[in-house]
């Protein structure tokens, strides 16, 4: 019982640790390269971040097959961000697009869940 | 789907990166926002997959020991839930109690569901202090993800309804020897003909009959003048004598002898009110008359009589009053004394003092509460009054003499009797013994009915009457 409680607490913390790592790595990247980040370095850092997050998940006991959506979603969202940055005239516009896209996706999943539970009809 | 503070903390981290990327014009920070977003979406997707599994495989049921319960009673409710596939979330089912139900322990109302072949189960006791229909809505199912980000609550399973009924007698049997009497008590026929609305008979016209009374249709049909007569409208004065001494308190709470008699008495009052007949009531306690309301047709009197009936509660202490010897009438005693006259045997010498006690018997009877009450009130009533006695079979000698007295003083007597055997608190444990006691009661009831102007009816729960009679039939 006590062991399962510790495991549960560790599992809860993997989420916080993963997000904290993502935030810290990106902030650290800016501090290290204040004059702009090379695209190759950025890709390398993002791959490292992805591997780090996957590692934390693996430590949390998640099977490798279930981590595929994480890897896929990570790559897709980073590619979408790159696309928004290319089409947008300003960084503010790109930021608004990225945040809006994420909000719409989160809300869509929430609505789908209500449908699955039969709380709403359509 | 509800989100937790931890979820908002993660979202806050991502948004902070987005804001910083704009403030410091650093596009890499926006990729950080996308990375955080990807991670949050991944967690949400995993949670959603688990929720779908729960929605598809969860079975919840609730049951109760009884769908009908008396006010103040208890029922045991069982909540079962089964999940056939393992999910990475915590699933809990919680019963949803009706507003007016009380449950001493709230912790027992929830069950945590693990994937298993056997359903998870919890039982708890519910108390019902109020009369009504209590509905347990479908139980709440709560899902919480292992990472503390999301929580969902929805209802799953069937509803459950419990009817809470007042503690009053049901299935009231009024009858003779197990046969139900169908008459509406209080209804009456005058047996006299004259002015009225109820047709009584058609007879040939005779000299002296009023021409206006001729029934012309019947005259045409029968080819001779005929007169139709109607039953005369009369008022039947009824007085209820309600015994509420301790022995009338026998039976389960809310279904005592007195409760059954009260139901019958209330029906009589309702019928009397419908027919605008004068009705009065006298309460009989261990010390004598406890309440007296003289017969009247005033509308307030009917309510007053009902209030008196509702106020009657068993009073005094109960002794062992049913005694076969004591139950013999004075007439039987006299017969025995005559039979023993001239006998010089030892038996006669021994028994004689008991048979000579006729004077003591009369004095004893005069002090008995029911006898005393009826005798006192008869002096205030007209001889056309119907007297209804509501009592049990414990004071047989007193009841016999009271019925005789009432029959002499009134137009008629109806005795409503509750057989003690039908009100044993522990139920009818030994049906054979119960049948024998019921037969003894029936003999006593018939003896009362044989008295001039007296009708004796038994009052009790019909299911018990049926059980006792079935036992008797099986024995034969």
Image (cartoon, rainbow, N blue to C red):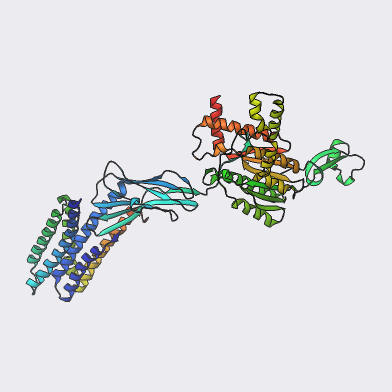
Q: Nearer the viewer, residue B302 or A100?
A: B302
Q: Nearer the viewer, residue B441 or B306?
A: B441
Left or right side of B140 for A70: left
Q: Residue furthest bottom?
A: B23
In this rendering, the answer to whether B336 lies above or below B84 is above
Q: How many marks?
A: 0
Q: Position of residue B34 (x, y in %)?
A: 18, 65
Quadrant containing the C terminus of chain B is top right
Left or right side of B295 for B12: left
Q: Residue furthest right?
A: B207
Quadrant containing the N terminus of chain B is bottom left
Name which quarter of the figure residue B470 lies in.
top right
Q: Position of residue B465 (x, y in %)?
A: 57, 35
Q: Nearer the viewer, residue B233 or B331?
A: B331
In this rendering, the answer to whether B371 lies above or below A23 is above
Left or right side of B342 for A10: left
Q: Position of residue B460 (x, y in %)?
A: 58, 40
Q: Is residue B182 visible in the rendered structure shown here? A: no
Task: Identify the residue shown where x is 64% and y is 34%.
Answer: B444
Name which quarter of the figure residue B264 lies in.
top right
Q: Is residue B27 visible in the rendered structure shown here? A: yes
Q: Position of residue B351 (x, y in %)?
A: 64, 29
Left or right side of B373 for B257: left
Task: Identify the residue shown where x is 69% and y is 31%.
Answer: B332
């Amino acid at each position: 019982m006590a062991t399962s409680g510790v495991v549960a607490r560790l599992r809860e913390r993997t989420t916080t640790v993963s997000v904290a790592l993502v935030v810290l790595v990106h902030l650290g990247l800016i501090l290290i390269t204040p004059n702009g980040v090379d695209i190759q370095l950025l890709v390398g850092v993002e791959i490292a971040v992805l591997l780090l997050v996957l590692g934390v998940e693996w430590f949390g006991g998640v099977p490798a097959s279930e981590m595929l959506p994480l890897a896929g979603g990570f790559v897709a969202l980073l590619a979408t961000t790159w696309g928004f940055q290319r089409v947008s005239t300003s960084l503010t516009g790109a930021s608004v697009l990225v945040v809006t896209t994420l909000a719409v996706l989160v809300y869509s999943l929430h609505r789908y869940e209500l449908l699955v539970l039969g709380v709403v009809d359509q | 789907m509800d989100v937790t503070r931890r979820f908002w903390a993660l979202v806050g981290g991502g948004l902070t990166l987005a804001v910083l990327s704009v403030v410091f014009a650093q596009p890499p920070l926006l990729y950080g926002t996308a990375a955080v977003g990807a991670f949050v979406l991944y967690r949400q997707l995993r949670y959603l997959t688990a929720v779908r599994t729960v929605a598809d495989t969860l079975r919840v049921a609730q049951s109760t020991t009884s769908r009908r319960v008396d006010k103040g009673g208890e029922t045991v409710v069982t909540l079962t839930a089964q999940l056939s596939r393992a999910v990475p979330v915590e699933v809990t089912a919680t019963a949803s109690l009706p507003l007016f139900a009380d449950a001493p322990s709230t912790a027992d109302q929830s069950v945590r569901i693990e994937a298993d072949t056997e359903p998870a189960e919890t039982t708890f006791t519910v108390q019902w202090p109020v009369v009504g229909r209590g509905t347990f809505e479908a139980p709440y199912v709560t899902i919480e993800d292992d990472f503390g980000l999301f929580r969902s609550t929805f209802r799953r399973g069937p509803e459950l309804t419990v009817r809470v009924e007042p503690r009053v007698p049901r299935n009231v049997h009024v009858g003779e020897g197990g046969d139900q009497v169908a008459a509406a008590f209080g209804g009456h026929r005058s047996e006299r003909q004259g002015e009225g609305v109820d047709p009584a008979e058609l007879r040939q016209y005779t000299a002296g009959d009023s021409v206006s009374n001729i029934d012309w249709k019947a005259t045409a049909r029968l080819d001779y003048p005929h007169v139709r007569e109607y039953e005369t409208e009369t008022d039947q004065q009824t007085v209820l004598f309600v015994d509420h001494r301790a022995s009338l308190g026998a039976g389960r709470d809310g279904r005592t002898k007195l409760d059954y008699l009260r139901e019958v008495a209330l029906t009589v009052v309702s019928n009397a009110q419908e027919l605008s007949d004068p009705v009065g009531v006298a309460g009989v306690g261990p010390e004598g008359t406890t309440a007296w309301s003289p017969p009247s047709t005033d509308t307030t009197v009917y309510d007053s009589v009902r209030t008196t009936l509702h106020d009657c509660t068993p009073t005094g202490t109960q002794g062992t009053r049913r005694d076969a010897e004591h139950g013999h009438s004075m007439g039987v005693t006299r017969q025995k004394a005559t039979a023993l006259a001239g006998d010089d045997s030892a038996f006669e010498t021994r028994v004689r003092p008991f048979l000579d006690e006729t004077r003591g018997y009369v004095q004893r009877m005069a002090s008995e509460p029911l006898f005393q009450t009826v005798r006192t009130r008869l002096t205030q009533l007209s001889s056309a009054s119907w007297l209804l006695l509501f009592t049990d079979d414990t004071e047989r000698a007193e009841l016999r003499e009271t019925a005789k007295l009432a029959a002499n003083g009134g137009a008629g007597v109806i005795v409503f009797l509750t057989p003690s055997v039908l009100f044993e608190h522990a139920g009818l444990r030994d049906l054979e013994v119960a049948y024998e006691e019921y037969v003894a009661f029936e003999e006593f009831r018939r003896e009362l009915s044989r008295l001039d102007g007296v009708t004796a009816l038994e009052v009790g729960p019909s299911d018990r009457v049926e059980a006792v009679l079935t036992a008797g039939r099986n024995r034969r």
